[in-house]
Amino acid sequence: MIEISDRLNAMEESATLAMSRISRELKAQGKDIISLSLGEPDFNTPQFIKDAALVAMDKNFTTYSPVPGYDDLRESISAKFLRDNNLNYPKENIVVSTGAKQSIANVVLSLINPGDEVIIPAPYWVSYIEIVKMAEGVPVVIEASLENDFKITPEQFSNAITPKTKLFIFSTPCNPTGSVYSKSELQGLAMVLKANPSVVAMSDEIYEHINFLGKHESLAQFNDIMNQVVTVNGVSKAWAMTGWRLGFIGAPKIIADACNKIQGQFTSGTCSITQKATISAMNADPSILKEMVQAFHSRRDLVISKLKEMPGVVCNIPEGAFYVFPDISFFLGKQYKEYKINSAQDLCMFLLAEGQIALVSGEGFGSPTCIRISYAASEETLSEAMRRMKEALSKLTI
């Protein structure tokens, strides 16, 4: 009899991918499902990037690439870090991977020994916890409240650190909340890091350019703690390249070298054609993304305005990414026909059945009284989804 490893049996299925799978199955059965479950831009990859991929193929860049990425790509990423973030990462400190998810896994597997503690603010991206568990680390979750815009304070961070703390993982802009840390808020976290030089911070900045505040701030900008920070980024979100699969880190060289080593045994270098196409994205002026960012901003306002019309739904005003993360505690304990709402997952399944909209429970993000709504869809689709949600919620009674 074949047995799956304990390591895998302890791993939860990604909540976002699970709901996406369920909604696809229902659509295949002919159901009119509106899925707002995946974090995928509904824009096409810019033509100049696709053109660069065609040129790469014509020039026969179809062989194995260096494990950490082509030199010219890493040089363009280095220039992007300096231009956009005022961060000085030489190409030797940059490792290109098959998506930011692999970048994160590389760092965790390179740093964490069994029993090491990893501090993660909740709400968090669904894969952080599972990657830490796979490395036999111990996740230490800090609750970030809706009242504080789902952001932790320096005091919370400091109080969570113990002699076993090895790593701190967070995102800004945040998936699933859309919260964005200001420069002063990041400076507060940086002061805690400075006081704890053995702790490494991994700052997931994949939504950097989808920022409604106008200017993105990076944790690594503070020189006295830059050697403790790994900056994660990629091309999936801002450049609408989810299927191209390319992420990267800027890191202290000892960590970059470790990630290079582990990647050499797992996947080697990522797709050569994707790498060459990404150079054009890294060299592009980010201002060309303005139209897309404005569209997301408008959609956010639309969704927030509709949610405010739904009694019992409470949410913050996200300043980045393309998610809203409302608290639905009001509906716990309510029911309709055979549906009894005891959890956010129950509510999501109810909305799927009665409203034919696919949302993601906050349980997978560490916030069991919230749900995640992606507004990476047209305003027409979002308006219809919100209409269905309001109608379905109105059916729930005590």
Image (cartoon, grey):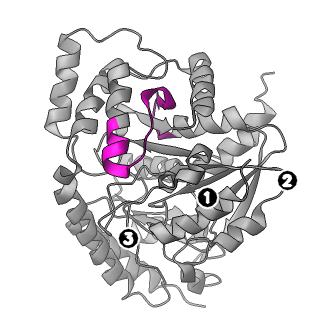
**Which circle, 3 or 2, is nearer the viewer?**
2
Amino acid carrying label 1: it is Gly
Residue furthest toward the front? 224
Q: Nearer the viewer, residue 63 or 202?
A: 202
As shown in the figure, which amino acid type bears the numbered disc 3?
Glu
The residue at 32%/75% (across/down) is: 303
Residue at which label 3 appears: 319
Is residue 304 found left or right of 96 in the rendered image? Answer: left
Please tell me whether residue 149 belongs to the stretch shown in magenta.
Answer: no
- Name the image quarter holding residue 9: top right
Write down the residue under mark 1: 364
Residue 258 seen in the current view: yes
Question: Looking at the image, is mark 3 or mark 1 earlier in the sequence?
Answer: 3
Residue 87 colored magenta?
Answer: yes
Mark earlier in primary sequence (1, 2): 2
Depth order, front residue of 140/92? 92
Q: x, y (%) of residue 208?
A: 38, 54
Quadrant containing the C terminus is bottom right
Q: Amino acid at mark 2?
A: Pro
Q: Callout 2: few (<14), some (14-19), or many (20+) C-alpha neighbours within 10 Å?
A: few
Q: Secondary structure at mark 2?
A: loop
Residue 81 or residue 273, whichever sits in front: 81
Q: Residue at x 79, y 26 (%)?
A: 3
Q: Which mark is residue 163?
A: 2
Disc 3 to disc 2, C-alpha distance: 35 Å
Quick one: label 3 or label 2, which is nearer the N terminus?
A: 2
Residues at marks 3 and 1, CA–CA distance in whole angstroms: 22 Å
Q: Magenta span covers which residues?
A: 79-100
